[in-house]
Structure formats: C-alpha cells, structure tokens
C-alpha cells in the first residue's frame, strides 16, 4: 500500500506541473483562464530625450594688458557687474604721456614747416620735392601722435564686454606685460547662458532612420529645451535649441548639442550640472504598451501574450525602442486593436482559451447582475 500511495502522489504532482515539465498548470479541462487585457490603440506621441550636460557663459572675455607697466589702481569690485568700456585697471602712464606730449610737439613743428613750405611753393621759392617732403613729414608726425595716443589709452584697461567679472589675478603694484599669458580678470555674460549636452551617436542614427523613413516628423530647431536642475526641479525658463555639432567625440561616441536658455535671475552659473529635455520629433501613429504586459528572457528579447480573435492565447515576439512615461513604445510585434494580457500571465500558455476582462472595466459580479435586472 505504501508503494501504491507513492505512485499516486507522484502522478498527481506531475499532472499539476504539466507532465513534470515545470510549467504552470492551466485551468482544469473545459474551464477557461481568467486574464486582464488592455486593448492597444495608436496615438500621436512626442519623442523626447533627457540629456545630461553643463552650463556655459554666453560670452567670455579675458582682460589682458596691451602695454607694459605697473598696475597703479584697480577700479572694480570682484564678483560685480561691469559695463563694456568701463575702466578696470590703471597702469602707470607717465612714460606714455611723455611720449604723447613729445609727439604732439613734433606734429606742431611739422605742421608749421608744411604751412611755410606751401606758402613758399606758391611763389616758387622752394622746389616741389621739398614741399612734398614737408607735407609728408607733417603726415608722419600726425601718425606718431595717433599711435602714442592709443598707447596712452591702453594704459587704462577697459572692459571689452558687459557681464560679471571674477577675481583679479593681480594687485596694485604688480608688473604686467603686453600679451602676457595670464589674464588680469575674466568677464562672463550670464544672461542668457548656453546649456551644452551630449547625445549618443547611436541614438541619433536610430532617430535619423525613423525620420528618413517618414515614421517621425522632426523640427528640432523650433523645439524648446526644458531644463532640469541638479536637484531634479524644473528650471523656470525654457531654452531654445541652437545647434548640434558636426563631429563625434571618438572617445565617448557622443556629439555636442547646444541650447540657449534665458537667465534673468542669474540662477544658472557657468559649469553647473543640468539636464535638458529636448523634443526629437513626433510619431503620428504610435503604439504604446503597458510595461507589465512585456516580458524579457535572459537574453533580453521581449515578448508578450495577446488574446486572439478565437479567444485563445497567442505569443508574440515584440521589439520596443524606448519608454514613454510608464509604457513601452512598440516598434514591431504589436498593433492597434491587439488585446495585450497584463494580468494572469502566470496561469496561461500559448493556445489556451481564456476569458478576458478589459483593465478598468467594472467587475462582473452579483451587484452588476442585479443592476442589469
């Protein structure tokens, strides 16, 4: 009897496990499985991509001396806003002023000589060549005055652009030289600012194929760039896409994408980490599938179960490209009108008859039956 009992127990277990194959047992013969489905539809979908990047100043100007000398005075406060043309540094200009005064004196002498020569030339008292030489000397003296005046003005270093100036690298009394490598200070224009992000070239190739095939309509140059700050909050002002670089960084496989973003409150500072949400294009007939209805095998291949027209389960191999909210964007394998099974997946298999209930539909029960009466 003990031997018979063991045989019966083994047979019952094998029946439950579908002939010992380890598969979930379906409903008893003659009964249908109970599943919940979502009927897929096609709809227009805007494709977006969130890309990481950093902010950059709109304009950057490094302040450098154009003459040699000792810094006599600094005329700005570090970290303040300055205007284009505002004097930032005074360099000791005594030598340059003396050279300018000397040039002015020589110009006056040359102009007087040219005037006398012209008067004498009218009565043929000097040769034409001597008169032309006097005129040329006066012109050369004028050029010398202009040059020395410019040098004198360079001793007072002005801001090349308007913006916010950083720290000064020199103090009063420091010796500076024309064309030196170290800038005296740096001015950055912060309204607006650039947001520079990087996009994968493989993602761009996929999008370009979809655009060329007519599946996606793209007008990236006219789309806004929504900025997400480092703490995840959305920045108050949307930017505008400016350009995408024409070369790919071989070390990363990415290329640069730049947007211009208003910054009236100066919240965005150069070098800040941000993320930009950019619209890539629009699909006019997109099929979105709930994520719980798509499964993946150990190789990463996606599949799904749908309820066929005859009320039985059909297995589908599915290709999905990206997530849109909490759903998968389906590239192939599913179409509008398919009834995708999202609940009861553990108790079904291909070819099994099922009773399907649309997700969100009111449950069929005593209350529903009495209401129908």
Image (cartoon, helix red, strand yellow):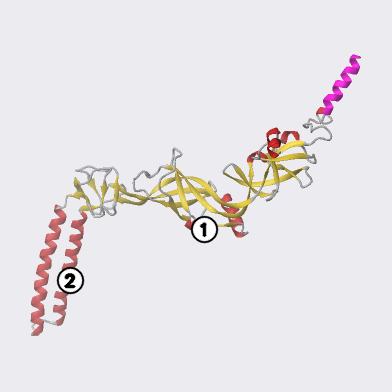
Local crowd at mark 1 within 10 Å, few (<14), some, or many (≥20)? few
Res 299 seen here: no
Residue assigned mark 2? 139
Is residue 145 found left or right of 212 in the rendered image? left
Residue visible at 74% across and 36% down? Answer: 34
In the image, residue 365 above or below residue 80: above
Choose between 58 and 282: the one closer to the eye.
Answer: 282
View extreme (top): residue: 2
The quarter of the rendered structure image containing the N terminus is: top right
In the drawing, what numbered circle is on residue 168?
A: none
Q: Please report the bounds of the magenta region as a residue range.
A: 1-15
Is residue 171 found left or right of 224 in the rendered image? left
Place of residue 120 in the rendered image (x, y in percent of width and height, measured from the top left): 8, 81
Residue visible at 79% across and 31% down? Answer: 25
In the image, residue 24 above or below residue 317: above
Choose between 265 and 193: the one closer to the eye.
Answer: 265
In the drawing, what numbered circle is on residue 219?
A: 1
Mainly helix, strand or loop, the magenta region? helix
Is residue 58 found left or right of 363 in the rendered image? left
Place of residue 160 in the rendered image (x, y in percent of width and height, measured from the top left): 28, 54
View extreme (front): residue: 373
Place of residue 144 in the rendered image (x, y in percent of width and height, measured from the top left): 18, 65
Local crowd at mark 2 within 10 Å, few (<14), some, or many (≥20)? some
Magenta segment: does it hold 73? no
């Amino acid at each position: 009897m003990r031997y018979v009992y063991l045989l019966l127990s083994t047979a019952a277990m094998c029946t439950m496990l579908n002939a010992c194959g380890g598969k979930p047992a379906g409903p008893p013969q003659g009964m249908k499985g109970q599943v919940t489905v979502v009927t897929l539809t096609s709809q227009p979908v805007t494709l977006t991509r969130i890309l990481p990047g950093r902010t950059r100043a709109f304009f950057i100007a490094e302040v450098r001396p154009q003459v040699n000398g000792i810094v006599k005075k600094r005329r700005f406060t570090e970290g303040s806003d300055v205007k284009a043309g505002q004097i930032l540094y005074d360099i000791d200009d005594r030598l340059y002023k003396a050279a300018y005064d000397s040039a002015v004196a020589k110009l006056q002498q040359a102009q007087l000589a040219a005037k006398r020569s012209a008067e004498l030339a009218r009565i043929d008292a000097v040769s034409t060549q001597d008169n032309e030489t006097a005129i040329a000397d006066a012109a050369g003296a004028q050029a010398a005055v202009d040059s020395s005046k410019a040098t004198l003005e360079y001793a007072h270093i002005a801001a090349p652009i308007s913006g916010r100036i950083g720290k000064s690298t020199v103090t009063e009394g420091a010796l500076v030289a024309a064309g030196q490598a170290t800038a005296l200070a740096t001015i950055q224009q912060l309204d607006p600012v650039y947001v520079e992000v990087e996009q994968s070239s493989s993602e761009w190739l996929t999008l370009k194929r979809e655009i060329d095939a007519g599946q996606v309509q793209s007008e990236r140059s006219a789309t806004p760039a929504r900025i997400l700050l480092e703490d995840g909050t959305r920045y108050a002002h949307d930017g505008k896409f400016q350009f995408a670089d024409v070369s790919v960084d071989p070390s990363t496989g990415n290329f640069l994408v730049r947007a211009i973003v208003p910054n009236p409150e100066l919240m965005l500072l150069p070098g800040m980490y941000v993320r930009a949400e950019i619209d890539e294009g629009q699909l006019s007939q997109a099929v979105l599938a709930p994520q719980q209805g798509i499964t993946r095998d150990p190789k990463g291949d996606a599949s799904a179960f749908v309820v066929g027209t005859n009320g039985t389960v059909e297995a589908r191999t599915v290709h999905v490209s990206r997530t849109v909210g909490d759903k998968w964007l389906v590239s192939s394998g599913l179409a509008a009108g398919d009834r995708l099974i999202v609940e009861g997946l553990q108790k079904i298999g291909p070819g099994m008859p099922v009773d399907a209930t649309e997700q969100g539909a009111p449950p069929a029960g005593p209350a529903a039956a009495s209401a129908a009466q």
